[in-house]
């Protein structure tokens, strides 16, 4: 049965909202409310409760309808409270609006996320206004658009909107509601959850993070899985759209009336679609099914046996298993080695086995020109990166002046530098990074001539890359994403360092010499006051080492859209470099000022690998 929280609230006198929402808690292993217990109680006491009491996904909120003859302040407060409810079609919230406003209000069109609650206060009547006006303000954290994509707001963003009240049938009602929902950060996290949907780029799949309701959507009545599939079919987010494609034909939707998608007894998810897919060829259908499988797996964090797509007449169109989808998506093989620079400035590799009790670390010199046996005992490595096939390395000299491209499969002398910097350490070349397309990226930090470079295919002359939105900032660190369509850039402007993600745009069909650019930089860690290190992590996330305002240095996972995932690494206060990989089973490797190279086995604490080592990397 549902239990009503009767904790009394404090009435706020500073113009902020009060709460009269009823919060229902679901009990039992299945977390299901029994029939007849999910509705509003028709007797008993309802008291005020405090707003935003932390994130609890088991809390259900039901708005309280407006009281008869309620004053303007109570109407405004009641509406703001009811916007956080789980009512179907947000019916209670609409009761605070005029009949016309209730009919036209589209809360699903967008969500405004505020870092705290909403401040609201009366601003009096304008000349010839039909009633009082109330101003809503707050610190704007982000918006979620009609495609469920999260967009962080630049620091210092403010939210302002006005509610015009009028009298309708002798009751005060709101005639101008917000264009969408307005929620505090804690309410947003309680109501919504992040999930990746997947699209193709360069033959592989790219994670596109979005937010869906944790329970049935008030408007569509779809469950979270169905909401996610619907969002996948609608197409990629606006930011990612220019560099990815979907295998679903334009206009593909779920079969009319579909509100819930569930597994059958064989752990198979069947997805009924409309007639846009009825005549799709088998190869295209299997690519569609692969997109669906990875999307739903990300939502459920479990391995399903199979996804089956159904035509509009519910006949089977095609199906794929997890293994087949991995082949279609060209999932790369897990990396064989982890790499770092040892105490003698040599580039070495090792194997950390999370399943083995034998934790004797046996680093070995990487083969090829970097090996002392190749006649280069004096070459000092500063930082390095290894291609995904682990056959090539990009090495920056210890003085940060030169970038060298070496083959790890054949011996021989060190080649001439592919790129040289005039900047002096620590303002020389950054740690390089490979992407999935085989291109190499590196930035020159020279204050007199900062630039981002790309070496197409890892060979040839470096190309200077145009980066839109730097606004005079200087790139001090970078990491290309495994999917090859995004790049994380740590940008210094004055004394401030901020982390951004840019979209890598490659002109189609024009070869390696075509001008590549980085567009639409967006904040990747807006909650961090400073960022020290970064790495891409499984499922399109970022692992970021940094400090929040007033906090300590820690390592946290961030979604690629700039929203923060709750998970953080334990005891990570002394790290200044970190390396992760797209393979979930591979451990995080990092550098600690005190302990050198360390790694984090699953369910354990950090362990030291090499006390004098530095600059840890995985392939990429």
Image (cartoon, rainbow, N blue to C red):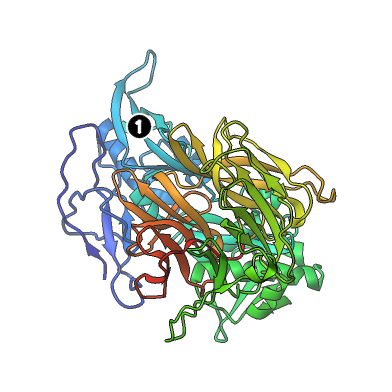
Taking 286 as reference, is 117 left or right? left
Q: Is residue 207 visible?
A: no
**Residue at x 54% of width, y 51% of height:** 148
- For label 1, the residue is 136
Residue placed most toward the observer, 397 or 276? 397
Residue at image position (49%, 49%) is 562
- Of residues 496 and 347, the one nearer the viewer is 347
Q: Position of residue 273 (x, y in %)?
A: 68, 66
State the image quarter where residue 72 is shown.
top left
Residue 447: percent from the left, percent from the top?
56, 33
x, y percentage for residue 283?
A: 79, 71
Q: Answer few, some or many: residues within 10 Å of disc 1's Cα (few below 14, many 20 plus, some between 14 and 19).
A: many
Looking at the rendering, in which quadrant would you find the N terminus?
bottom left
Identify whether 336 is placed above or below 133.
below
- Judge whether 503 appears above or below 3 on screen: above
Residue 288 drawn at (x, y percent): 70, 67
Locate the C terminus by quadrant. bottom right
How many numbered callouts? 1
Left or right, 365 with respect to 73, comes to right
Element assignment for label 1? strand
Residue at 33% across, 59% down: 60
Determine if residue 359 is in view. Answer: yes
**288 in relation to 478, above or below:** below
């Amino acid at each position: 049965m549902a239990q009503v929280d009767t904790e009394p609230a404090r009435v706020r006198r500073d113009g902020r909202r009060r709460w009269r929402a009823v919060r229902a808690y679901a009990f039992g292993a299945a977390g299901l409310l029994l029939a007849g217990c999910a509705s509003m109680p028709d007797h008993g006491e309802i008291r005020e409760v405090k707003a935003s009491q932390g994130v609890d996904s088991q809390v259900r909120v039901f708005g309280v309808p407006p009281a008869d003859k309620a004053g303007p302040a109570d109407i405004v407060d009641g509406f703001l409270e009811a916007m956080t409810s789980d009512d179907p079609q947000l019916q209670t919230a609409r009761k605070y609006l005029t009949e016309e406003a209730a009919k036209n209000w589209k809360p699903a069109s967008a969500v405004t996320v505020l870092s705290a609650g909403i401040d609201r206060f009366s601003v009096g009547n304008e000349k010839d206004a039909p009633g009082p006006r109330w101003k809503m303000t707050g610190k704007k954290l982000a918006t979620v658009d009609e495609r469920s994509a999260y967009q962080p707001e630049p620091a210092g963003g403010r939210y302002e909107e006005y509610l015009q009240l009028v009298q309708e049938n002798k009751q005060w009602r709101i005639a101008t509601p917000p264009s969408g929902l307005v929620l505090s950060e804690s309410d947003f996290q309680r109501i919504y959850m992040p999930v990746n949907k997947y699209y193709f780029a360069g033959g592989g799949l790219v994670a596109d993070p979005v937010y869906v309701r944790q329970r049935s959507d008030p408007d569509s009545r779809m469950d979270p899985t169905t909401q996610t599939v619907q969002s996948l079919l609608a197409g990629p987010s606006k930011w990612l759209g220019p560099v990815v494609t979907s295998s679903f034909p334009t206009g593909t939707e779920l079969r009319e009336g579909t509100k819930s998608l569930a597994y059958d007894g064989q752990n198979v998810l069947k997805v009924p679609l409309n007639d846009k897919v009825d005549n799709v060829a088998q190869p295209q259908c299997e690519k569609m099914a692969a997109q669906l499988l990875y999307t739903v797996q990300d939502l459920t964090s479990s391995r399903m046996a199979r996804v089956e797509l159904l035509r509009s007449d519910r006949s089977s169109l095609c199906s794929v298993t997890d293994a087949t989808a991995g082949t279609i998506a060209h999932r790369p093989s897990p990396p064989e080695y982890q790499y770092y620079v040892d105490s003698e400035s040599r580039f070495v590799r090792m194997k950390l086995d999370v399943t083995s009790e034998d934790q004797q670390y046996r680093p070995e010199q990487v083969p090829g020109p970097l090996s002392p046996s190749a006649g280069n005992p004096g070459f000092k490595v500063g930082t390095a990166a290894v291609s995904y096939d682990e056959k090539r390395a990009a090495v920056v000299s210890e003085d940060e002046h030169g970038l060298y491209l070496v083959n790890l499969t054949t011996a021989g002398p060190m080649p001439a530098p592919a790129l040289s910097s005039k900047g002096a350490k620590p303002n020389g070349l950054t740690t390089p990074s490979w992407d999935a397309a085989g291109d190499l990226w590196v930035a020159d930090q020279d204050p007199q001539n900062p630039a981002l470079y790309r070496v197409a295919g890892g060979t040839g002359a470096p190309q200077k890359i145009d980066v839109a939105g730097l606004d005079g900032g200087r790139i001090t660190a970078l990491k290309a994403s495994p999917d090859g369509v995004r790049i994380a850039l740590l940008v210094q402007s004055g004394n401030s360092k901020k982390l951004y993600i840019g979209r890598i745009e490659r002109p189609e069909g024009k070869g390696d010499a075509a001008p590549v650019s980085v567009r639409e930089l967006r904040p990747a860690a807006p909650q961090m006051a400073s960022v020290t290190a970064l790495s891409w992590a499984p499922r399109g996330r970022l692992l970021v080492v940094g400090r929040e305002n007033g906090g300590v240095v820690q390592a946290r996972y961030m979604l690629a859209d700039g929203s923060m995932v709750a998970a953080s690494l334990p005891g990570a206060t002394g790290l200044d470099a970190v390396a992760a990989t797209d393979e979930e089973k591979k451990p995080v490797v990092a550098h600690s000022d005190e302990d050198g190279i360390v790694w984090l086995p699953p369910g354990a604490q950090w362990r030291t690998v090499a006390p004098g080592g530095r600059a840890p990397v995985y392939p990429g």
